Amino acid sequence: MPTFTAPDGTTLAYHVTGDGPPLVCLPGGPMQDSVYLGDLGGLTAHRTLIRLDLRGTGRSAVPRDTASYRCDRQVADVEALREELGLERLDLLAHSAGANLAALYTARHPDRVGRLALITPSVFAVGLGITAEDRLETARLRRDEPWFAPAYASLEAITAGRATDGDWDAVAPFWYGRWDDEARAFRAAEQRQRNDEAAALYASDGAFDPDATGTDLARFPSPVLVLAGEYDVAAPARVMKEYAGLFPSAELVVQSGAGHFPWLEDRGRFVAAVVAFLDGGGVSSP
């Protein structure tokens, strides 16, 4: 397992798997061990995945200054990884909350990013609004599922600002295209993989300047893929279309039947969409 040193002296780890051109992968969570990305549905057959363990997660060290968990402070970690790899430009894939870090890195270092793939991205860095109705409308696509009624009631409570701890567990099925044993195991592992202290600081005051970031991204010339899941209440398709519109050269793909982790629901469709984008061809909604 290779390591490198961040500008503040923190030792960071990354994992290299697969064959083909390199693709740097930033995990979500926020601040979750990158192990959950796995082989991204078999993307390792087409690309060498370089998964960064963000500071304080996975095999990376806990920093002396925990304020450095703030998302904007970690941009320097991504740049240090690029230098460690000896790459002039990165093809970059980011999932969920990791898209905030990818957006800030791209805004600060646009000449260092080749192709940018944002998978069910969080929108904090760019300041887009997700309404309660965006989430509830997406959730209602699942109305025929046996677990729907109690999960939907809990989602209503969350979106209305009256959630209890139990409501957050109850809505878990909405994060997955299939609520089966694989999804339950994935969910259970997720709880163990996140650094909760770091997650609480990731989006703390000063982390994001959406107006400035949006202005910078509007000038980013390279191709961008925004891949959404049809059933994803965390990143509803309407908002993902708006996200894609921030870039001059972006394409939105909505993967049918997918939730927040689209490589779990249909490996083939996910990999085909991402590879087509990285190879420079057109991508149609799978």
Image (cartoon, grey):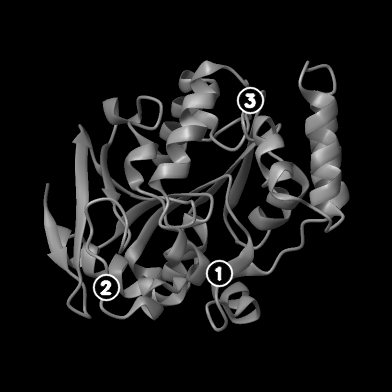
Q: Residue at x 65, y 35 (%)?
A: 172
Gap between marks 2 and 3, in whole Å?
A: 36 Å
Front residue of 156/163: it is 163
Q: Amino acid at mark 1?
A: Leu
From what the image shows, is residue 259 above or below residue 224?
Answer: above
Q: Which residue is mark 3?
A: 177
List the residue tagged with mark 1.
217
Mark 2 or 3, closer to the camera: 2
**Residue 220 in view:** no
In the rendered image, residue 218, in percent from the top left (x then y), is placed at: 60, 70
Disc 3 marks which amino acid? Gly
SS type, badge 3: loop
Q: CA distance from mark 1 to mark 2?
A: 29 Å
Marks 2 and 3, the one that precedes in the sequence: 2
x, y percentage for residue 247?
A: 60, 61
| 1 or 3: tag closer to the N-terminus | 3
Viewer-proximal residue among 199 and 247: 199
Q: Secondary structure at mark 2?
A: loop
Query: Could you tell me which residue is drawn at 87 percent across and 55 percent down?
Result: 160
**51 left or right, relative to 266:** left
Q: Nearer the viewer, mark 1 or mark 3?
A: 3
Q: Which residue is mark 2?
A: 63
